[in-house]
Image (cartoon, rainbow, N blue to C red):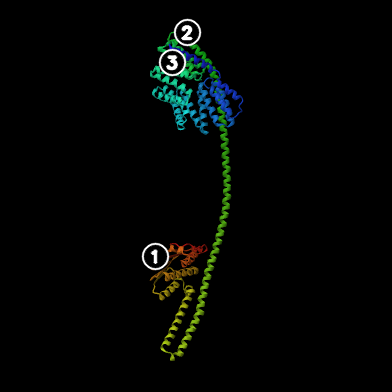
Amino acid sequence: MRESLVVIWLLCSTAVGSLAARQPSARADSLQRLLATTPPDTTRVHLLMLLAWDRTDDDPLAAVRYGRQCLRLARQLGFKTGECRALLMLGWAFLRSGNYPTAVQTQLQARRLAEAIPYAGGIIHADNALGYAYAEQGRYPSALRYYFRAIALARQRHDHVLLTPILGNVGQAYLEQGRLDSAWHYTWEGYRYDLRYHDQHSEIGDLSLLGDIAARRGQQLEARRYYLRSIARSVGMPVSYALCRSYLGLARLAQVQQPHQMLAYARQALLASEQGRYAKGVFEASGYLAQMMAARGDSAQAYRYLAMAAGTRDSLFSHSRQVQIQALDFSEYLRQQTLAEQSRQATAARRQYWGRVALLLLAGSIGGIYLLLNRRRLQQQVAFAQERQQLERRRAEEVLAAEERERRRIGADLHDGLGQLLSVVKLNLGALRNELEPSLRKSQRQQFGAALDVVDESVREVRGISHNLAPYVLIKRGLAEAVRSFLDKIGCASRLHIEFEALGLEERLDPAVELVVFRVVQELVQNILKHAQATTLSVQLLRQPHRLTVLVEDNGVGFCPTSLAGQPNAGIGLRNIESRVAYLSGTVHIDSRPGRGTSTTVEIPLGPAGAAGRGQARPDRLKT
């Protein structure tokens, strides 16, 4: 008896609550008053959106009107997030009215916009709504695909508020497929999230769904408890779909045990669906009542409920037709917006294309001007470099020519001046010794002999120095004979064993090449005599078609070529060799180690290459 009183109280309270839901709520009245004083800015967008959501369940037509105003204002303001949320709300309004094609179209557009912004919450909302639309049409695999995509993104972002209603929708899809364990798992998880995050709207729907699952499992008492809890929580809430499901669930449970209450529950389900304009609930409840009356043999009552259902159907059809008209108008609006957006994108693409073409042309022009200027600059640099090289060549030629002239002058002065004086001294000493010889003692004769010997040695030394400074053999007989003559004199004056070999030098070389190579050989041999402490010397001259190779080797103490880099006064002779060879565009390679002797290789290019090289000669570092 007490339970029956509770049920009657619930029936009365929910009926009153549903009647109140037909009119705008106090919250809607407050929002409308705020809307009247709000300028057209983002705040007005939010107010319109709240009004639309508030009327989605009880009056989808009003929700569509507010949603379109919200969408239009958001687009005028360029408020992309507001535009996306307005599209999401409109999609739900079309879902509630049963216009699934327009709902899917709207949600897809909202999702594309959410991806472009980007707006992760909008993507989650859109996927959930698309899943719900497919589930309402019985396409559960497609619905689950959208649901799970929304769940994955919500969990990735730890957005439990958005996750809460989706879990119950998954449970509903599994229930419709007969997978009760999966349905219970997801619905119960969603219900726990409802309680944790205080989502009463989702909580009412999940309680009703848990009742359906328990009823399908045969757990009638547990199912009844969930249904009653859902109805109690829905007082004053615009949740006609949950109320219809709960009352129909109670009617089915009471069909066997409490037939008198079964009809009351079924009538209440029909009333809640009518008042909430829930088309699917109206047809389910009226069909159930007509079926029950026919089963009881009450044809008059069955016909009355069928007639009532037909009348309600007509009324709902009229309302639905208005929503359909709004939907068609909105679809055309969306199509026009899409065409306008495509036109804007095409215009932007054309502008971008021509902008890129202009930039390419500008870049090409700038690049051409830069290349032209750079070419001129490079030509000037080449001209300056050639002029500098010519000046360096002239300087090197003048230095070498001046050096040779000075050598020849000094050699001539020694030969003609000091040499002649020494000859006169020798003649005078000889004449004096002849005059005084009868009266000279033996020691005096020896002193005269020693003096004459010194004078003879001095004459020979002056003659040798003169010949070295002015190598007449080189001028008359060529490089090979000049080097041979020089080495012969070195061999006579020292204990050094000298080997000399010349190949391919039957014809004379360029005078400048012969002179430079001869001076290089002189410098190398003088370095060996001064520093190497060698007992064997080998000099080779090898002429090839385009190259002259000079190889000078000794078995002396050797040295470390790199150690000369840090000594400012060391290696002057080597630097002289380097500068002379560089004048001929040649290279010098020294291979030496302490205790292992020294091998010096000089390579001089011949022919046109050598002639050209002398015009571009620069001193190179010694290669070791």
What kind of residue is marked 3? Leu
- Regarding mark 1 in the picture, which secondary structure is present there? loop
Q: Is residue 254 visible?
A: yes
Query: Which residue, given by chain and number where applicable, does mark 2 sit on?
Result: 300
Q: Which percent across, then down, holds residue 61?
A: 55, 21
Query: Can you give x and y, in whole percent of width and height, for residue 37 in the image?
Result: 61, 25
Q: Are marks 3 and 1 in contact (CB under 8 Å)?
A: no
- Which amino acid type is shown beneath numbered disc 2? Ala
Q: Quadrant of the N terminus?
A: top left
In three-dimensional space, the C-alpha distance between marks 3 and 1, rounded to whole angstroms, equals: 112 Å
Looking at the image, which is closer to me, 33 or 341?
A: 33
Crowding near the residue tagged with mark 3, few <14, some 14–19, many ≥20 C-alpha atoms within 10 Å: many
Residue that appears at 52% across and 13% down? 311
Specify whether 164 is left or right of 398.
left
Would you name the residue on which mark 1 appears? 594
Sequence-first disc among 2 and 3: 3
Q: Residue under label 3, please give it.
A: 250
